Image (tube, helix red, strand yellow):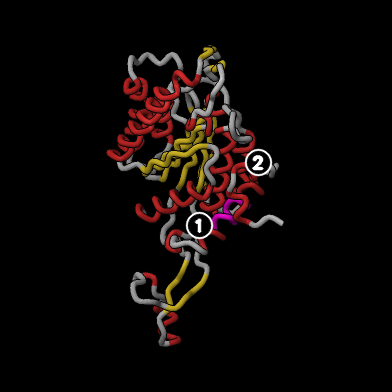
Amino acid sequence: MRKATDYLSPALIRQVARLDLRARFIVEGFLAGLHRSPFHGFSVEFSEHRRYVPGDDLKTIDWNLYARTDRFYVKQYQAETNVTGFLCMDLSESMGYQRLQELTKFEYCICLAAALAYLMVRQQDPVGVIAFADRVRTSLEPRAQRKQLGNVLALLSRLKPSGRTDMEASLTQLARMIRHRSLVVLLSDFLPPADAPGASLEEDLEPVLRGLRHLRHQGHDVIVFHVLEQAEAEFPFEDLTEFEEPESHEKLTVDPRGVRTSYLETLAQFRETIKQECYRLRIDYVPLHTGVPFDRALTSYLVARSQRF
């Protein structure tokens, strides 16, 4: 019989057909692991008391309980604030890539978004969804009611990756749609289109970076989940391989052994450029690939939330 923590693995969550069950298994597995971890302060709701020990934050003491018992107890697993959250999904066709893992990048992000929605609803945070590619394609206004989880999961389950990327136009439109200061959770591979006019990687990425700057200029707090397929992140290819660009469908046959070093160096530069701009803008940057267990992403979200609000 599987334990809840087993479902932190993308390979195992693929076996669960229903998105609501996937989200539930991921979150329950994460919370089960959190209970045994040092991250007690990053929980989603009040769970229990425990005896105070020297070094505990005095803000966590339950003074009402002290008045009744004359003993110090601290609250565990209590979210301190509510914040409106938007789960922003990249729908571009490159997100449909799958090679080493059974989940495509898009399916991985859908599972992660569903788990984040589950957490937000448990925290009584309003949560909504915005999906984009070359422009915003669909959206769901944030609500804090329990039934909102069903609305979010229904929308996520209908989304399919298709079309070309225009990250700058999409993020600019997205920033204008979100009228009040919110937490924007952005899930994307951030791959520029194959025909990007830039003569260098920095120029190709500039539209992405301008879009991120626009979000921050509007006052939103942003968490970036930069998700690649495991094969994109590790480049495990050995034999002569034909690669196809997912949006233009251009094909190129190469010897992977001859390009591996330059590919991995370019990828590292690609991620570092986005990371450094996120750092400058005070955006939390979380690099992932489709083989990474979901708890790493969920912990990053809760750490970022606890630091900002």
In the image, is residue 28 part of the stretch drawn in magenta? yes
Q: Look at the magenta stretch and give its main secondary structure.
A: helix
Which residue is rendered at x = 48% and y = 46% of the image?
297
User: x and y percent of residue 220 in the render?
Assistant: 36, 42
User: Which span of residues is magenta-colored?
Assistant: 25-31
User: x and y percent of residue 59 in the render?
Assistant: 35, 70
What is the three-letter code of the residue carrying label 1?
Gln
Q: Rounded to the nearest whole Å, what is the CA distance between mark 1 and mark 2?
A: 26 Å
Q: Earlier in the sequence, mark 1 or mark 2?
A: 2
User: x and y percent of residue 122 in the render?
Assistant: 54, 57
Residue bearing the label numbered 2: 14
What is the three-letter code of the residue carrying label 2?
Arg
Q: Nearer the viewer, residue 6 or 23?
A: 6
Q: Nearer the viewer, residue 147 or 26?
A: 26
**188 left or right of 9 in image:** left
The C terminus appears in which quarter of the rendering? Answer: bottom left
Residue bearing the label numbered 1: 123
Q: Nearer the viewer, mark 1 or mark 2?
A: 2
Q: Quadrant of residue 269?
A: top left
- Whether residue 169 is visible here, answered yes or no, is no
Which residue is rendered at x = 44% and y = 62% of the image?
38
Q: Is residue 202 above or below residue 19?
A: above
Q: Nearer the viewer, residue 5 or 222?
A: 5
The residue tagged with tag 1: helix, strand or loop? loop
Q: Is residue 68 above or below residue 254?
A: below
